[in-house]
Image (spheres, rainbow, N blue to C red):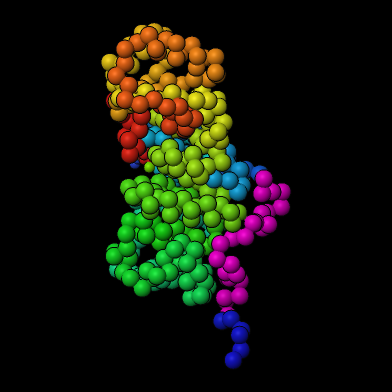
Amino acid sequence: MSDRRPLGASNKRHRSVVLPAIRTAYPVGESVADSVINVEDLLKRYPPDVNAVDGITFSVSGGTVFSMLGPNGAGKTTTVEILEGLRVPTNGKSNVFGVDTTKDYAKIRGRVGILPQNFEPFDNLKPIEALDYWAKLFDMRTARKEMNELLDVVGLSERKSLLSKKLSGGEKRKLGIALSLINEPELLFLDEPTTGLDPKARRDLWRLIEEIKREGTTVFLTTHYLDEAEKLSDDVAVMHRGKIIARGSPSELVSRYGKTTVVVLEGVGKDGLREITRRGIEASESDGDVTVPVSSPSEMRTIFAKLSSIELPVKDMYTRRQTLEDVFLSLVGTKMDEGVLQE
Ligand SMILES: Nc1ncnc2c1ncn2[C@@H]1O[C@H](COP(=O)(O)OP(=O)(O)O)[C@@H](O)[C@H]1O
Ligand SMILES: [Mg+2]
């Protein structure tokens, strides 16, 4: 048997690895360290006057995980869909791989993978059939063996012959991610990949995202989960009402906007908070617990001296390091629960 390909197929891409190896295939003049995404003064206005994206500027470096973190309605999906060439901005610059996404998206489409928000793929196809269909849509000559490897990477090997509608929420997202990886993207958009999943499924997906990053793929993640952004991201943009209100690595954000330690006073409640703040101590309350940020041992002594003079119904007391959640609270002034800002 000849192994000659059918006519016309010779220029099609052929998968050699399941996940892209560290990329060397950047066009001349573009290096891995360069920005993969460049956004300047990006504005998206919906009639009559909603600025869903309100003049944001940022860039994303190759090979990193970039998280856009914010509550529902912050403008995350609008931003992502502009970068995916699906929406046209009202104003500003939106470049991916040096290409204007409003003009030349076709040039880079093959280098990008997309997991849309709330994506639930193909109820009546089995995972392996869904991959086969998707590969054909992308004009990929993906061998069955490679599709099986891809299902293995996302942890669906044992479920590949089940109809997709029988998969759990987490497994459906994994299938969505497998589909988004079929063209070996250099840049992968994951729009809220873990929203609504149980904690175990979320952690499973975190491992998968870390593996994708290890293979050299740049990941643009949107999330309203602070722990997710903290765990996965090299770089975080906190988005609120269409604007980026803070930017940096999780640890930079904590050191810039937070203090090093938090004293937690359990069960002190809103009444306790009033007493504490009346003595000039900066504190906040959630779920009955009061947290007091502290930046140095001497400040800790001062605060304890003041606290000991107040009658407080403390159930328990401990210190912990600050997290992105504390930073978010101090930036936005309220906590977030499943993407919804609390009153
Ligand atoms: N097609 C649309 N028409 C009008 N308003 C929209 C449209 N899409 C989104 N919005 C509004 O834009 C804002 C940002 O939405 P979105 O980008 O979906 O935010 P997020 O993904 O952070 O939840 C919201 O106020 C939303 O209601
Ligand atoms: Mg969204």
Count of all numbered marks drawn on residues in the image: 0
Q: Tell me if residue 27 is in the magenta stretch.
A: yes
Across and down, in percent, residue 199 comes to 36, 48
- Residue at coordinates 68% horizontally, 57% vertically from top-left? 24
Q: Which residue extends farthest bottom?
A: 1
Q: Is residue 73 visible?
A: no
Compared with 287, 116 (above or below) is: below
Nearer to the camera, 107 or 291? 291
Q: Tell me if residue 178 is in the magenta stretch.
A: no
Describe residue 62's horizontal placement relative to residue 198 as left or right: right
Compared with 52, 97 (above or below) is: below
Which quadrant, please, contains the C terminus?
top left
Q: Is residue 218 visible?
A: yes
- Residue at coordinates 49% horizontally, 39% vertically from top-left? 230
Across and down, in percent, residue 172 comes to 36, 59
- Residue at coordinates 52% horizontally, 42% vertically from top-left? 233
Helix, strand or loop: magenta stretch: loop
Nearer to the camera, 89 or 280? 280
Q: Which residue extends farthest right?
A: 29
Compared with 276, 336 (above or below) is: below
Across and down, in percent, residue 70 comes to 41, 35
Nearer to the camera, 142 or 9? 142
Which quadrant, please, contains the N terminus?
bottom right
Magenta residues? Answer: 7-33
